[in-house]
Image (cartoon, rainbow, N blue to C red):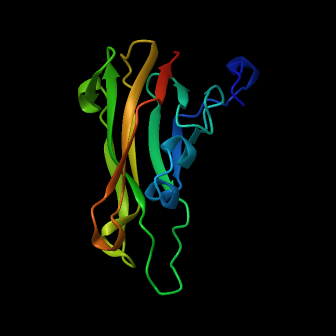
Amino acid sequence: MNDRVDPHALPGAFSTQYNIVTTVDVAGVLAGKPASDCIWMTDNSPTSTGKGSAALETVCRRGQVLNWLVYSLDSEQRPDGSYPPIARILNIAFLRGDTDFLAAYDAGFDVKVFGAPDRIRSPYTPVYAYWAGMVPVDAGLGRTRYRMTVEIAGVGGGRPTYVELSQPSITIDG
């Protein structure tokens, strides 16, 4: 569903917050597959485009809260009692111009990280970690790309793997 939807045809469809969900095939990324084959994004905005790809364009309005969440495929406990590596959002930065990325705060978004500890894996590893921020009420209309850096925990305590997504964007239409 990549066609724009007439928002007037969907009374009440515009929520005060949208969830931008990124699903990561961790095993695929660690096996060296291209990110485009291992990462899918979607949201609950009725007018967004690019759903199911790494180039999601979330259509939102000033004052709406945006929540960025990441889910890892195959995150269940293994028969040997260990857990596979998980993915988490390391950073979100917004694009100004063609190449200059800004921290979310510098772009007018007061984005914060939320989550609760996963006492099974580690008291320092969140069960879920999500980033949330409000679209500034004085933000200009139009499209802004952002870069989201996803970190995948190192296997067996090894070095983490990083994947940068620089195709997603938000479009403020009102």
Image mark count? 0
Residue 77: image location, x then y, percent: 51, 78
Q: Can you say whether 110 is above or below 38 in the image? A: above
Residue 105: image location, x then y, percent: 25, 31
Horizontal placement of 112 versus 141: left or right? Answer: left
Residue 72: image location, x then y, percent: 50, 59
Quadrant of residue 73 within the rendered picture: bottom right
Quadrant of residue 74 within the rendered picture: bottom right
Horizontal placement of 27 versus 112: left or right? Answer: right
Q: If the image is split into quadrants, where does the N terminus sit?
A: top right
Residue 97: image location, x then y, percent: 32, 14
Residue located farthest toward the bottom when viewing the structure as drawn:
80
Q: Residue 119 versus residue 14: which sits nearer the camera?
A: 119
Horizontal placement of 163 versus 42: left or right? Answer: left
Residue under the point 54% across and 29% down: 58
Residue under the point 47% across and 30% down: 168
Residue under the point 44% across and 75% down: 83
Q: Can you say whether 18 is above or below 73 in the image? A: above
Q: Residue 129 versus residue 157: which sits nearer the camera?
A: 157
Quadrant of residue 108 within the rendered picture: top left
Q: Residue 25 versus residue 31: which sits nearer the camera?
A: 31
Q: Residue 118 versus residue 137: which sits nearer the camera?
A: 118
Residue under the point 42% across and 57% down: 87
Residue located farthest toward the right when viewing the structure as drawn:
9
Residue located farthest toward the front when viewing the structure as drawn:
32
Q: Can you say whether 125 is above or below 44 in the image? A: below
